[in-house]
Image (cartoon, rainbow, N blue to C red):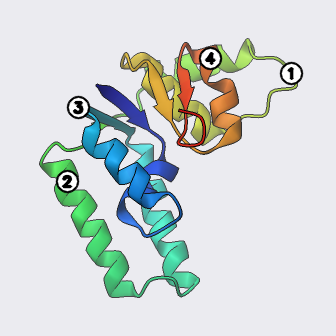
Amino acid sequence: MRRYFDTAYLAKYYLHEPESTAVEELVLQSGQRGISILGRAEFACILHRHVRENRLSLSEAEERQEMFQLHVARGAWQVHDITASLMARVEARLMGMPADLFLRSGDAIHLATAELHGYREIWSNDRHLLAAAPLFGLTPRSLKHP
């Protein structure tokens, strides 16, 4: 099964956080695992935050980053680029959204990436992203509400 993961779930795969074991099982059960190239920068920021908050040492963060990069190089993660056509899709979807729907730009990029590349569902624990998923033709999925 093809599954798209936002960066929150990507991070849970590499870090010891609540739900990490369940996310690891989910990722390993997935045939193709999609992420946006935006997730690479977001994941590096999450690692930096963990170092800043003393939840990881610098060497531990570097080990996790290297593991992630190795997995990307080996094709474990299908990394989708941000293109002009993707950004046009983001813009078009945002213009048609209800005024009361809150959505951050990064989440919109994740949703449009999943939609553009033919994923049917997106896995996240972000309630705003999940609420907007149907507007991108996606089934919102989380461990709390599979």
Q: How many marks are shown on the rendered structure? A: 4
Q: Which mark is residue 31?
A: 3
Q: CA distance from mark 2 to mark 1?
A: 39 Å
Q: CA distance from mark 1 to mark 4?
A: 15 Å
**Secondary structure beneath label 3:** loop
Determine crowd level at label 2: few under 14, some 14-19, many 20+ residues with C-alpha closer than 10 A.
few
Residue type indicated by callout 3: Gly
Q: CA distance from mark 4 to mark 3?
A: 22 Å
Q: Which mark is residue 134?
A: 4
Q: CA distance from mark 3 to mark 1?
A: 36 Å
Residue indicated by mark 2: 71
The earlier-in-sequence mark between 1 and 4 is: 1
- What residue is at 36 percent from the left and 43 percent from the top? 26
Determine crowd level at label 4: few under 14, some 14-19, many 20+ residues with C-alpha closer than 10 A.
some
Residue type indicated by callout 1: Ala
In the rendered structure, the answer to whether residue 33 lies left or right of residue 115 reads left
Residue 47 figure quarter: bottom left
**Secondary structure beneath label 4:** helix
Eye-nearest disc, 3 or 1? 3
Q: Which mark is residue 99?
A: 1
Q: Contact (CB < 8 A) between labels 1 and 4? A: no
